[in-house]
Amino acid sequence: MTRAIATSLPDDPAELRAMLLRVIDERDDAIRTLRLHLAKRFGPRIEALDPRQLGLFADEVKAAERQAAAETVTVPAHTRRKGGPKPLPEDLPRETVVHGLSAEERACPCCSKERLECGRSRHEVVEIEPARLKVVVHETVHYLCPECSGQGVRARKPSLPLPKSYAGASLLAHVAVSKFADHCPLYRQEGMLARSGLDLSRSTMCGWMLGCAELLDPLVALMRRDVLRSRVIQSDDTTVPTLGLVKGRAKDARLWCYVGDIDHRHAVFEYTPSREGKWPQRWLQGFDGYLQTDAFAGYGALCAAPGGATEVGCWAHARRGFFDAKDLAPGFCLEVLREIATLYAVEKEATERGLSHDGRKSLREERSRPQLELLFALLASRREEHLPKSPVRQAIEYVLTRREAFARYLDDGAVEIDNNACERCMRSPALGRKNWLFAGSADGGRAIASWLTAVQSARLHEVEPFAYVSDLLARLAEYRDIPAERKATDGEAMLRELLPAAWVARNPERRLPVAR
């Protein structure tokens, strides 16, 4: 084998030198690609760039900087909050403790007269009481007429989320929010509740979460109908390992998220046993608006069908490819990242100016469209410089093969530049998965989807989740117990009062200053 290779080498020293240089370049590129994959698998995931990085690279970066210097982008100034702790909220209850002196200590050492109070200093300290459980005893009074036999009546007791359980709405909400908003698995909550005096098994809490998920079904169905009326839907998916789907191990099922536009702002999750394209196609059947995704092939049939959805690219996903590959071709990738940042600067300006959809579209036509054409031209001119299977070339092809989809956000001011709103909603199952690890069954996966729908939709409207879920469970219990004929006539109106936007409008004190 070695002799065969040697005989195939060229005799010309120049050709041999060129061949060796190509081999060395391919080896170095393979090593850099391997490092990139290792960093992507095990390294930090934050996509932040130090502006000073641009000065560390070769002449191609400096040339790109000189070219960009002529195209100045003005970024509006911002106000930075001074350091130090934030002031304590005024609505926190306050308890005043006065520290004085005894009569002996107030006596003056010179004349023995009592010293009088001349002022007070004040210092606030925050203390906390652990969770305090209580038992509410519901006594239903019965009445009987003393004269008429059989004329008895009793007062109506409130509907409970789980009629045969001792769990009240607030306890159920505490368990649900702790798991699905704060990512605390049930086995940890088991110990936390035990410290507060309630001996409660995780299997019992698991049954509670399954039962309450069924209570959420009518509201989740209403949110789904609302999202499908949207002009723009953002979608993404992630894995959720599930027991029981295959024998002997957990199988990766999927959680899909669908976020509606500003007029139908819900995040509706769906659990499926696989990532086949039939699932989003079934969920989005009949939708003919803009669909903004990460270019997963399963959405292709929706966008290819006559009268179907219109595909919109996500520039956050496009940016990620160049960010991940920046160590392989630093000058080129950083130049592309700077061009993409210019597109985002236009979006930031539109937001700060409070522009309407039409105003944002006009600003994009004026500023973003010329910039986007320059970016496409840059990618097309440099694509052949990189090997077909290199990460840099793949990042270029990802954009150029979907050029129309990536430019489509310019056509309508209602469309965002990326689907980060949906990706932010996907952080919750990703963080939760690191704590509760897997779903116990397919029914458990569907319950997770229902709870995430309620909690993440509340977060989209900056609603305090515990107060919302507590009231939600109590009101849905009443909805479940009303007569069927009333549900048929007034059911949707009753449920609409429980949507996060309507609920926080009636309870403005429960709006968080920042979505959490």
Image (tube, grey):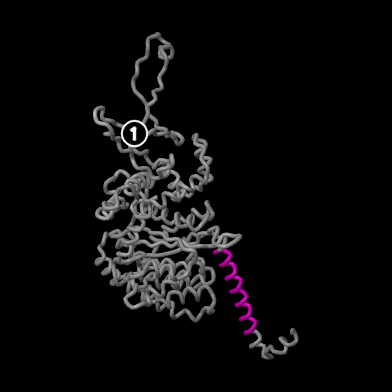
Front residue (pair 430, 64): 430
Q: Please check the rendered image and state whether residue 27 is part of the magenta-colored stretch, yes or no.
A: yes
Q: Is residue 176 above or below residue 134?
A: below
The percent position of residue 265, horizontal first and vertical second, equals 32, 58
Does residue 150 appear in the picture of this structure?
yes
Q: Is residue 254 above or below residue 108?
A: below
Specify the quadrant that holds the N terminus.
Answer: bottom right
Q: Quadrant of residue 302?
A: bottom left
Front residue (pair 198, 26): 198
Bounds of the magenta span? 18-40
* Mark 1 secondary-structure assignment: loop
Q: Is residue 165 above or below residue 351?
A: above
Is residue 391 rendered to the left or right of residue 156?
Answer: right
Front residue (pair 305, 128): 305
Which amino acid does the dot numbered 1 rest on? Thr
Q: Please check the rendered image and state whether residue 6 is part of the magenta-colored stretch, yes or no.
A: no
Q: Is residue 93 above or below residue 452?
A: above
